[in-house]
Amino acid sequence: MTYRNGTYVAFDGGGDSDIITGDIKYFNLMKAWKSSEDIDFTFSDSHQKTYQVNDDSKLSTLRTRLLERIKNSKNFILILSDKTKKKNKNLDWEIEKAFEYKLPFIIVYPEYEKIQYPTFHKDVWPIKLTKLIDEEKIKCIHISFKKEPILYSINKYSVVTEVYPNTSVSYYSIDAYKAWGIE
């Protein structure tokens, strides 16, 4: 049996590998939080657990590596920004595979301080995510891109412990955000 302790992070790369303007900057910020001695933020990055792939790798090679990472993950973070495209076959593929492997979904929105009405953000949901949420097939927590709710969610939701958000549009209360110092 596979030891599933990693967190898989997905985002719309959109062909934009620019670390300043592309959504990869949010993933890189999570890695910076993790490596900082001054910040309490730890997670097991599923992308560091297999061989890396090059930008010029074949799609089949890329997907083989990504699938291996998903299989070894305990949860799935999906970063959705105003740059996320509704139609993205690679992101839809990652969402489908995370769903197939029953990973809890942690949906993260960088442009917001708090998430209280997840369906208000439906305009940035990729097609596959929209379908799964509308059909209530997956369990998701929708949160802001802040280290406290991200870390809390990573530690709480796991396919290993079988702890999932209650619904496809779960979110934390205003009081939870206040407890994290997010006003």
Image (spheres, rainbow, N blue to C red):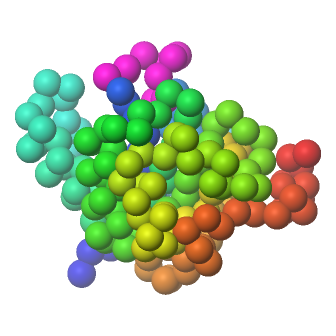
Q: How many marks?
A: 0
In x, y percent, where is residue 89?
Answer: 26, 42
Whether residue 17 is in magenta: the answer is yes
Principal secondary structure, stretch drawn in magenta? loop
- Residue 102 percent across, percent down from the top left: 37, 73
Highlighted range, magenta: 15-24
Name the foreground residue: 97 vs 167: 167
Q: Is residue 174 above or below residue 137?
A: above
Residue situated in front as seen by the camera: 115 or 63: 115
Residue 2 in view (yes/no) = yes
* Residue shown at the point (19%, 29%) measured from the top left: 54
Instruction: Name which residue lies at 9% across and 44% down.
Output: 60
In this rendered view, identify the residue nearer to me: 28 or 114: 114
Residue 12 in percent (x, y) is at 40, 35
Q: Quadrant of the C terminus?
A: top right
- Specify the quadrant of the image occupied by residue 96: bottom left
Q: Is residue 123 above or below residue 131?
A: above
Left or right of 159? Residue 41 is right
Which quadrant of the structure image shows residue 62? Answer: top left
Residue 70 seen from this side: no
Q: Is residue 82 above or below residue 182?
A: above
Q: Is residue 63 above or below residue 152?
A: above
97 vs 20, left or right, is: left
**The N terminus is located in which quarter?**
bottom left
Q: Residue at x 34, y 62 (%)?
A: 98
Residue at left offset 90%, top offset 62%: 175
Counting from the top left corner in percent of width and height, residue 166 is at: 61, 78
> Where, by quadrant of the figure, is residue 59 drawn?
top left
Is 104 part of what is drawn in magenta? Answer: no
